Image (cartoon, helix red, strand yellow):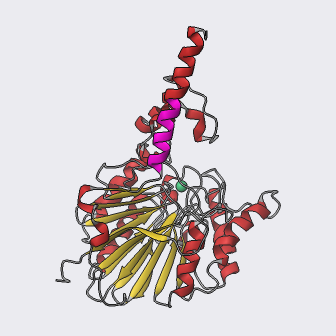
Amino acid sequence: MLSSKFQNALKYVVAAWLILSTLHAEAQKAWYSKSEINWETVEQPEHAPIYTIYLIGDAGEADFSKPAALKVLEGHLEKADSNALVVFLGDNIYKAGLPDTSSDERGAAERKINVQLDILDAFQGKIVFVPGNHDWDHWRPAGLVAIKREESYIEHYLDRGNTFLPDKGCPGPAVTNLTDNLVFIAIDTQWWLHKWDKVNVANEVCTAIDDDSFIKELDKVLEANKSKQIIVGAHHPIITNGYHGGRFTIKDHLFPLTAKYHNLYLPMPILGSIYPMSRKYFGHIQDVTHPRYRLLIKQLSGVFSKYDNLIFAAGHDHNLQYFAKERQHYIVSGSGCKTSHVAKGHQASFTYARQGFVKLKYYSNRDVLLEVWVTNDSIDNIGHVAYRKLLEHPTSK
Ligand SMILES: [Zn+2]
């Protein structure tokens, strides 16, 4: 006979295993809001798009021995013409950006960024890398120096002009005109969150130097371009159903150590909740609950709300999300090399924790077709569409 103690323990293990296997199966599935369930039947424009934008984020540690978003993206970019832009939405090099040449980590960091730069060989369109928190030396005091070093490395390696925006550790806004009617604006949200030195010796190169002037300058640039279609790209989302938005799973509460060590299923009920709960309710500086991050959200959404049809694209959480909020569109595309949990609902139209990227096709009538491309189960450079939505422009009808 088994002792009752042992039987109880066994029950607990079986129950935990059942919960985990359901959670695991759920994590593999895309989620659609009620209105988006029939997304596959949505009519697509007949004409070819006049411009295409690819959005990928958090691609700074790719592993090509598994199905990889970067490989699928490469397959798309090889076929694209010059009317295209690819944006890397930050966290371009894990874990601390590009260290200087004396560091032992330098070689590994170069390899992490080079695999991204090399997929752009045959691409004829424009390229933009924006900075993320990891690129700012893991948001530590030497961040400003690190971000300038990464900019200079990427721009030298690619030799395709000003491909890292905003320049020189400035917050932006950095404006790139894509067509007469379409504009891309890069901003550096880590600059906003950065607690350490970010006062540039070359401050004269920055159009904005503090919180106020940054928000005013952004508003000014949006106002000047309001007759055009606008897309703003940054690293930090202002709405997200991922960990940075405080959305944790039962697994994170019961087995907190799996966040760091994937297979360490050491049950720590109650005690284990302290970490996810503290991030949900207090947040660290990289989470939407932190006061400094909350202020960024308030300021950016305040400005964006004035401009109809604006698209804001970010990464940071390692999954794919789309929100239609008021008259703006919010995209999270942060599964460029890894995935993490994303919750359903909470105002989202679509969420999916799978490697991939977002493709935006712009048409002459100002409609935009949003497509989410994800990896197949086997390694290839083709992938498949997991979600599609026509963002109709009010004047297109
Ligand atoms: Zn990040």
Is 22 one of the magenta-colored residues?
A: yes
| Left or right: where 374 falls relative to 312 | right
| Left or right: where 114 falls relative to 133 | right
Q: Residue furthest left?
A: 397
Residue 111, quarter of picture:
bottom right
Residue 302: x, y in percent?
29, 59
Q: Name the residue rendered at 62%, 41% in the picture.
A: 260
Task: Check the picture and name the quadrant holding the N terminus.
Answer: top right
Q: Which residues are magenta?
A: 16-27
| Left or right: where 286 falls relative to 223 | right
Residue 342: x, y in percent?
43, 50
Q: Name the residue rendered at 27%, 65% in the picture.
A: 38
| Quadrant of the picture in which ligand 1 is shown | bottom right
Residue 152: x, y in percent?
67, 74
* 241, above or below 64, in the image: above
Across the whole image, how many numbered discs are drawn on residues? Answer: 0
Work out whether residue 300 or residue 371 is closer to the camera in this orientation and state it: 371
Q: Name the residue rendered at 38%, 50% in the picture.
A: 295
Residue 77 visible within the image: yes
